[in-house]
Amino acid sequence: MNPSSWMPPVAWSLSHAQTVIEAAATVAFAASGLLEAARKRLDVVGVCVVAGLAAFGGGTLRDVLLDRRPFFWVAHANWLWVLLVACVAAMWLLRARHVPITQRAMQWPDALGLGLFSASGTQIALQMSLPPLVAVLMGVVTAVCGGMLRDIVINEIPTALYDRRPYAVCAFAGGWVLVGLNHLRMDDAWALPLAAATATLLRVAGMLTEVRLPSWREDL
């Protein structure tokens, strides 16, 4: 039997596993945006905007590049209500309890969202029969661009560009893990979490160690 005969057909809608992964990534990046907005002491509108850009920015840019409709947040409009309610509630809670917000606190949900979005973005591109390298780059776009928009809006150099610790490289590696697992015909329900975990764990390892990417010398 031809192996391709029992593979699921290409579909424009997300599979159940992809929907779960994309939803979890959206929550994680929304949390990172919310924490950054709170650290900058933005008002409630600013908090919602920054959290929304972090949560939906990367996936929207991916869908624009792939000419894919509807966007995730359009197809699942209830997530917009969840985001708005969560932002208002979290802002009230953080203000009431005077919880200190550090940049380090933002990096943990950001690492989780990075891994999840890199896997879902790569899988969506693979379903559209794009070459593996292009699919992996679409995963990187999905994982990185939401955080870049978040940082730009709060007047910070994007973490992906200055952090020196592996960031986009982790998403790139996670995407290739998914390509390899798909090549081995592993079920998406296992392949997506494993690829996401790879990217997230690589990012966490970079956060906890002294591994640094090559950069300019300080005296230049």
Image (spheres, rainbow, N blue to C red):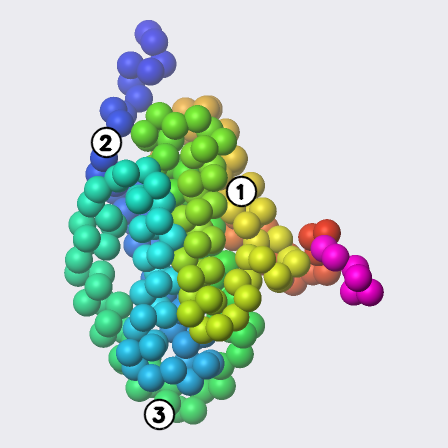
Q: CA distance from mark 2 to mark 1?
A: 24 Å
Residue 122, image x, y percentages: 41, 38
Could you tell me which quadrant the N terminus lies in? top left
Q: How many marks?
A: 3
Q: Residue furthest right?
A: 219
- Going 22% across and 67% down the picture, which residue do you hit? 82
Residue 140, image x, y percentages: 47, 45
26 relative position to 159: left or right: left
Camera sees residue 216: yes
Type of amino acid under label 1: Phe
Helix, strand or loop at mark 3: helix
Q: CA distance from mark 2 to mark 3?
A: 46 Å
- Going 35% across and 41% down the picture, which residue do you hit? 65
Camera sees residue 205: no
Residues in magenta? 215-220
Residue 96, image x, y percentages: 35, 92
Q: Which residue is mark 3?
A: 96
Answer above or below: position of 15 versus 128.
Answer: below
Helix, strand or loop at mark 1: helix
Type of amino acid under label 3: Ala
Other residues around mark 3 within 10 Å, as few (<14) / some (14–19) / many (≥20): few
Q: Which residue is mark 2?
A: 11
Answer above or below: position of 218 versus 88.
Answer: above
Find residue 208 and report its image quarter: bottom right
Q: Earlier in the sequence, mark 2 or mark 3?
A: 2
Q: Which residue is mark 1?
A: 172
